[in-house]
C-alpha cells in the first residue's frame, strides 16, 4: 500500500510540475478531486488523499477544507524556502556524516572542499544553441564548473588536436547527449579526457507526450536545429501531429493560442523581450539533467576533487617530513 501511494504521489507531483512548466497549470488552479484521482488510479480514496497530503507537505499543492485541492501559491517567489521534507533530508545527511566520523558542524565545510578544491573545466558538445545554452548554464550554476560550449557542426571529423578549440584541449570533462555519444566518446579518447553522456528532461518529454494526445503543444526554440530535433524525438508519439515548434526570431509567436500549453527553452526565455506575454505563461525551467545524470556528474566532481585533496595532503606530509 505504501509503495502504491508513493507511485501515485510521484505521478501527481510530475503532473503538477510539468503542467506549470508547460503553462497548462498556474498557481491557484483547482486540481482533480480525491474521488477523481481514486477513480483514475483505481484505488481507495484514502490512498488518493494521502498522496495529496504528501504533496501538500512538500508545498506542491494546497488542501482547502470544504473547497478542494489547488496548485500551491508560493508565499514568496523571491526567496528559497526549506520545506519540512527538505529539513528531514538535511537532518539525515548530517546523521550519516556523524556515522562516518564527521561532526555536523564540520560537514558543510567538508562537502565544500570535496566539490570546490579544483575549478574544473567542462565543455558541452551539442548540435543546437538551445541545448548548448541550457547544459552549460546548469553545469555552471548547479555544479560549479567553468563551462563552455562547442557546436559540433564547427568540428571537422578527424581534426588534429592542434586544430581543436582551446576549450577542448584544456577540458577536464566533455558532456553531451546520446545523440552524439559515439562521436564524443571518440573525441574523448583522442584527448584523454573523461566524457559523460547525459539524459535530459525525460519527465517533461513524458508529460508532453501525454498532452500531445489531447491537442497541440507548442515549443518555442531559438535554433531551428532544436525544432527539427524535437520532431525527431516525438516522431513515434501517438499525438506527434500535434507538436508545434516555433523559432523565436523567425515565427509569429502571437499566433500561439492563449490556452495552449507552451514550453520555452532557457535560451528562448533569456532572449525574449521582458514584456513578452509568453514569459508570464510559464515558470522558470526545471533542471535539465535527469537524476541519474546529475548523480554521474556529482560523482565525477567528488572523485576528482578528493583525488586532488589527497595529493595535497601527501605533499604536505612529505614537506613536513623533510623539514623535520
Image: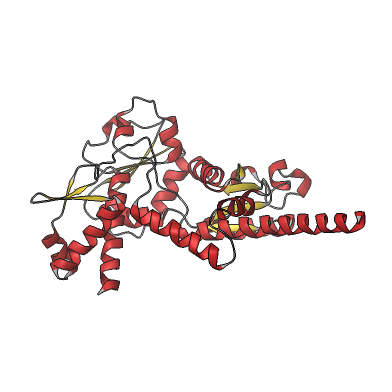
The residue at the point 59 percent across, 58 percent down is 196
Task: Give the number of callouts.
Answer: 0
Q: Nearer the viewer, residue 88 or 189?
A: 88
The residue at the point 22 percent across, 58 percent down is 52
Is 285 situated above or below 316? above
Q: Position of residue 243 (x, y in %)?
A: 31, 48
Residue at the farthest left position: 66
Q: How is the image coloured?
A: secondary structure
Is 277 situated above or below 200? above
Location of residue 250 by image quarter: top left
Placement of the C terminus among the 4 image quadrants = bottom right
Can residue 176 be seen here? The reply is yes
Can residue 210 be seen here? The reply is no
Q: Position of residue 287 (x, y in %)?
A: 44, 49
The residue at the point 27 percent across, 44 percent down is 261
Is 218 situated above or below 45? above
Position of residue 53 in the picture relative to residue 82 (left or right): left
Q: Nearer the viewer, residue 70 or 287?
A: 70
Placement of the N terminus among the 4 image quadrants = bottom left
Position of residue 150 in the picture relative to residue 13 (left or right): right
Residue at the farthest bottom position: 1
Position of residue 277 in the picture relative to residue 35 (left or right): right
Q: Nearer the viewer, residue 302 or 178?
A: 302
The residue at the point 74 percent across, 59 percent down is 310
Position of residue 161 in the picture relative to residue 152 (left or right): right
Amino acid at each position: 500500500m505504501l509503495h502504491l501511494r508513493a507511485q501515485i504521489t510521484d505521478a501527481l507531483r510530475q503532473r503538477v510540475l510539468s503542467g506549470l512548466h508547460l503553462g497548462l497549470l498556474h498557481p491557484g488552479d483547482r486540481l482533480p478531486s480525491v474521488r477523481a484521482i481514486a477513480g483514475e488510479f483505481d484505488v481507495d480514496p484514502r490512498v488518493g488523499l494521502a498522496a495529496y497530503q504528501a504533496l501538500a507537505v512538500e508545498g506542491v499543492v494546497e488542501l482547502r477544507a470544504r473547497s478542494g485541492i489547488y496548485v500551491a501559491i508560493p508565499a514568496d517567489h523571491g526567496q528559497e524556502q526549506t520545506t519540512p521534507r527538505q529539513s528531514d533530508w538535511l537532518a539525515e545527511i548530517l546523521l550519516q556524516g556523524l556515522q562516518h566520523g564527521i561532526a555536523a558542524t564540520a560537514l558543510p565545510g567538508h562537502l565544500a572542499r570535496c566539490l570546490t578544491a579544483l575549478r574544473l573545466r567542462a565543455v558541452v558538445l551539442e548540435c543546437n544553441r538551445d541545448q548548448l545554452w541550457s547544459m552549460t548554464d546548469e553545469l555552471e550554476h548547479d555544479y560549479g564548473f567553468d563551462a563552455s560550449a562547442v557546436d559540433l557542426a564547427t568540428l571537422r571529423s578527424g581534426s588534429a588536436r592542434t586544430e581543436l578549440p582551446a576549450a577542448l584541449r584544456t577540458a577536464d570533462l566533455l558532456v553531451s547527449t546520446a545523440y552524439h555519444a559515439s562521436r564524443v566518446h571518440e573525441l574523448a579518447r583522442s584527448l584523454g579526457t573523461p566524457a559523460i553522456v547525459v539524459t535530459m528532461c525525460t519527465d517533461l518529454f513524458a508529460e508532453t507526450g501525454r498532452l500531445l494526445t489531447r491537442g497541440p503543444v507548442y515549443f518555442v526554440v531559438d535554433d531551428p536545429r532544436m525544432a527539427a530535433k524535437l520532431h525527431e524525438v516525438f516522431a513515434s508519439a501517438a499525438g506527434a501531429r500535434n507538436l508545434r515548434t516555433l523559432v523565436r526570431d523567425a515565427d509569429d509567436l502571437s499566433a500561439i493560442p492563449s490556452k495552449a500549453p507552451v514550453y520555452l527553452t532557457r535560451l528562448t526565455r533569456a532572449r525574449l523581450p521582458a514584456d513578452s506575454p509568453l514569459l508570464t505563461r510559464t515558470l522558470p525551467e526545471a533542471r535539465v539533467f535527469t537524476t541519474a545524470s546529475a548523480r554521474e556528474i556529482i560523482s565525477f566532481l567528488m572523485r576528482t576533487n578528493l583525488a586532488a585533496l589527497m595529493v595535497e595532503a601527501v605533499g604536505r606530509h612529505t614537506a613536513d617530513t623533510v623539514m623535520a
